[in-house]
Image (tube, rainbow, N blue to C red):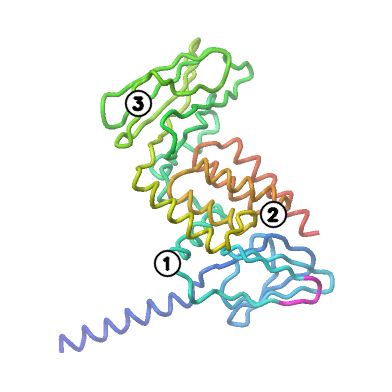
Amino acid sequence: MKNSFIKIVSKLALLFVFSFSIAVAQDVAFFSKVKGSVKITDANGKEKKATSTTKLADGDKVSTGADGSATIMYYSGKEVVLAAKKYHTVKKKQEESSFLSGLYSTLSGLVWGQASDASMAGATRAWAGDANRMITATYPSETKILESEPVFKWADHRKVAGKNFVVTIKSEISDFKYEINVSGVNEVAYPKVAPKLKVEEKYIWTVKDAAGADVSPAVKFSLLDPGESENMNDDLKEVQKVCNNDITNPQWYLLTAALYRDYGLMRQAETAIQSLIQLKPDMAQARIMLATLYKETGRLEEAKLEEEAARKLSEGGAK
């Protein structure tokens, strides 16, 4: 009797998981551009109006009206352009590797403004809501870095900007502490004569107005481990194969942005997204991707600007 009950419970659990997986379809693409009358019919026959914020799942059928047009961007980088009175059925590649599936999941988070749990900002994201910061440490901020002598950068949001600053770098693990006095600029390179930064350490740093009490919120950074760097280079080669060695198309920038973000290299991810924006200046979701990255690294003022740019692009495309 006990065994029969266990079997019934197990079957019900499997049925629930199966039903849940069907109900929650994984998005595989999005609209990089949508204009006029465009509708979506999902795998169950339910129709809805397409917008720039609509996620596209496997089996969705996109159709354009007489005054409609749309550009669909798959997370793989494949692009489908639909003119008026055309349709396209969204299809997920069945042979996707776990490596690519992981990158697509990361991309989905970037495109839809979902902060990464794996990012260094995850544990300190609470302070990101502070809109009253006078000084912001912008780089390196909530990131891993490749360089052993980084250039520390900050933004002064006060009406009267400061002239003299003190950059303080500390370890979260040891008693390491190093200070740099700066005058007349908002950046400074880590001195070659200073103690070398170590891979095994986890650092925090702040910048303070030397003439007052205003100080930036502390932000974190660490050096990328050589083993991680080797793995990342191997992954970049895999991405290059997927892109057919063409590193000038949207697919390359989309996938490398996701890859760098997964490795915690926020600056490199930012560069990839900015290159995507140069290639696709009317792609609203690229702006959202950049805004997401800025939020994760505490650059709220820049995030707001990118969100506003995305809103204007979306409104313009909807006309």
SS label for mark 1: helix
Q: Is residue 263 above or below residue 21?
A: above
Give the mark toward the camera: 3 or 1.
3
Give the mark toward the camera: 1 or 2.
1
Image quadrant in which the C terminus is located: bottom right
Query: Which residue is found at the position 43% from the left and 55% from the top?
Result: 234
Counting residues from the N terminus, which is met first, the one under dot 3 or under dot 1? Answer: 1
Depth check, front residue: 311 or 58: 58
Counting residues from the N terminus, which is met first, the one under dot 1 or under dot 2? Answer: 1
Q: Return the x and y of residue 133 as percentages of the image width and height.
A: 53, 28
**Farthest-out residue, left:** 2
Quadrant hosting residue 242: bottom right
In the picture, the disc for residue 98 is 1
SS label for mark 2: loop
Residue wearing tag 2: 283
Which amino acid, mark 2?
Met
**Badge 3 density bin: few <14, some 14–19, many ≥20, Cα 10 Å:** few
In the picture, the disc for residue 196 is 3
Left/right of residue 238 with respect to residue 59 in the rendered view: left
Distance between mark 3 and mark 1 Cα atoms: 37 Å
Which amino acid, mark 3?
Lys
Depth check, front residue: 279 or 125: 279
Kindly report the secondary structure that dominates the magenta region of the rendered protein: loop
Q: Which residues are magenta?
A: 83-87
Quadrant hosting residue 221: top left
Q: Return the x and y of residue 243 as percentages of the image width and height.
A: 57, 62
Q: Return the x and y of residue 196 as percentages of the image width and height.
A: 35, 26
**Farthest-out residue, front:** 245
Count of numbered circles in the view? 3
Query: Which residue is found at the position 27% from the left and 32% from the top?
Result: 173
